[in-house]
Image (tube, rainbow, N blue to C red):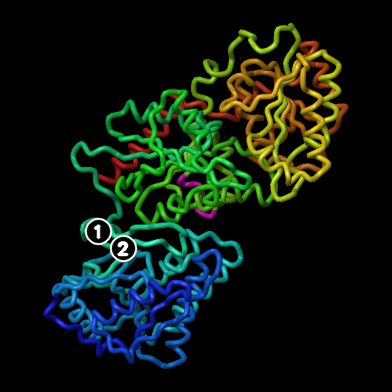
Amino acid sequence: MTMITINWDFIDKVIYINLNRRKDRRLYLSRELKKLGIPKDKIFRLEAIEYSPGYIGCAMSHLHALHMADKEGWKNVLILEDDIAFHHDDDAYQRINKYFNALNHVNWDVGFLAANYQNVTQLGSVDYIVKANKAWCACAYIVNQNYYQQLQHVYTQSINALLQGGQQHEYALDVYWHESMLRDCWLGIFPNVGYQQPDKSDIEGQYVDYRGLFAKPLNEITQRQVKKRIGNQKIKVDILFQWSPGWTNFETVIDALRNDDKFDCRIIVIPFTSEGSTDPTNMAARAFLDECEVPYYGYENYNLYERKPDVVFLQNPYDVNRPSIFSCANLIRNGIKIAYIPYGLDMGASELNTNFQYNMACHNSASWIFVRSQRHKNEFALHCAAGKDHVHVVGHPKFDHYHERYCSTEKTVFTNNLKTLLWAPQYIIENDPRWSTFDLYAHAIMDIIDQGKVNVIIRPHPLFIQWINHFGDKVKEQYAQLLAFTQNRSNVIWDFGADYKMAYSQSDALMADVGSFLLEYLPSRKPILLLTHEKRLGINNSASFIYHDYDVAWNEKDLYTFVSNVISGNDVKQKERLAALSRELYFAPQGAGHAIIEIIKKSFSLESE
């Protein structure tokens, strides 16, 4: 038990924010405040605003607390969240008293009792106060009366941006305040006298333990914000693997990492959370890796906070498709660098597509994005809020060892001598039929199959069936007809395999909607048909050359013409397509996987100098 008491005369009032349903936390914090010796007449409980997502409700609650302090005219207010835990020892209590006394004699705006500091400036005159330059977590901070209006303005802007769809990693309360923190006088006690207690987070919806973030040594948060490599300490790189069709995004990167003794690489299988998903433990990804004899960790046996990776590779840019512990905001908050290789060779046009491709939290938070071409990189300059300086042209790992993977000349699927077409229909989202041409061309393709002059491999997008309800009843009926029609036919097969090695190697030409296959198939040098229509989504600037350099079907007549040309061996667009191959895709001399790890290694080498 501490022999020192805290002098609370400096603090005018204390507000703690607590959800009505978290009576457990209310009881806990009441005991905590009593142990600190805070006079009861200084303490106010503020009912937290429940709002989904939780980080918006959090910001609203803190704004409400400032409104109360401003309205009541308090000289300052200590705002606490109900998961704050304090250190109850003589050293902590003594530092609190010294801290309060110092604040009484300087001009200050905000004072932290506990924060997740990323960067601070030491004050030469005292060893228990730091100037906060960048810090997260609004669990325990004092606001001076002169700063109420300014901070209310900051919080209001944060909330408005979030309500309009702004990303958490940019506009959450404890991110949006960083500009004010740099500009104004935000001080903090150091070491922290408190921390967020391990518990189920009302914001993240799961158990979290952030204690390590409140116990960083001073040398880790002063000056440059990097993890210094000590001696032969390896760079820890973790691959978050969710989706077996995207294995080729990572395969050569992982090979390069595991063959370089400067890296410690692990593959972590995590759930792919999406509408209609029926595999919460991602057994499909585990089975794929088991079959490939690739070692991995299941997410249930992985502790992000104990492992503390230096770098995490994300397989897709969508936070909504990952457990929240692996959200971009949480990774950045924990000092983990994000690397991203676009999971598909994106090319679709539309405002929604552009945001998905260039301006998600992942794109803006990543330390490195690795892209296929300079044209692709230039699109980030136009559409990514973070610009293109963190974008590197390395080619795409999908193209490493391409011919060994996909260009087998041995035909093993069909026993006849007919040419084989690969048809890759796209899925749709948000009930927008413009994403796919399935409804336009399914009957024509059934007719082509029925004529018996070609073989057809049907490989729908992996989300096609999962999201088929977005198509409507007409398309669901068409799909049922197609399934029934193709049964027991010797010249058609469906491919739902974990990879598309069979589909690529056994086909002689591709017919596809706007999507990654249009570029992924290009190095095969085989004919490619873009399936589109004047009422369907177009192609963005990074791949607009396709309209000129590929065969394009705007209607059924164009489709039949392409099929006829494939049957007769007449590759009308061969010259233009092969010119596009050498012009539009970059191939690194030692492969994209090798180029990627060299960039990461160089980055850490520069930071350690």
Q: Is residue 389 magenta?
A: yes
Image quarter for residue 43? bottom left
Q: Quadrant of the N terminus?
A: bottom left
Q: Which mark is residue 216?
A: 1
Dominant secondary structure of the residues highlighted in magenta in the image: loop
Q: Which mark is residue 246?
A: none
Neighbours of disc 1 within 10 Å: few (<14), some (14-19), many (20+): some
**Horizontal and vertical percent position of residue 67:** 48, 85
Give the residue type at disc 2. Answer: Tyr
Give the residue type at disc 1. Answer: Lys
Q: Is residue 320 magenta?
A: no
**Horizontal and vertical percent position of residue 481:** 82, 31
460 up-or-down from 69: above or below? above
Q: Residue at x 62, y 47 (%)?
A: 275
Question: 215 or 20, which is in the foreground?
Answer: 20
Q: Quadrant of the C terminus?
A: top left
Question: 239 or 482, which is in the foreground?
Answer: 482
| Mark 1 and mark 2 residues within 8 Å of each other at the beta carbon | yes
**Horizontal and vertical percent position of residue 596:** 42, 34
Magenta residue span: 385-390
Total tally of numbered discs in the picture? 2
Q: Secondary structure at mark 2?
A: strand
User: Residues under labels 1 and 2: Cα distance?
Assistant: 8 Å
Residue beneath disc 2: 117
- Residue 550 seen in the current view: no
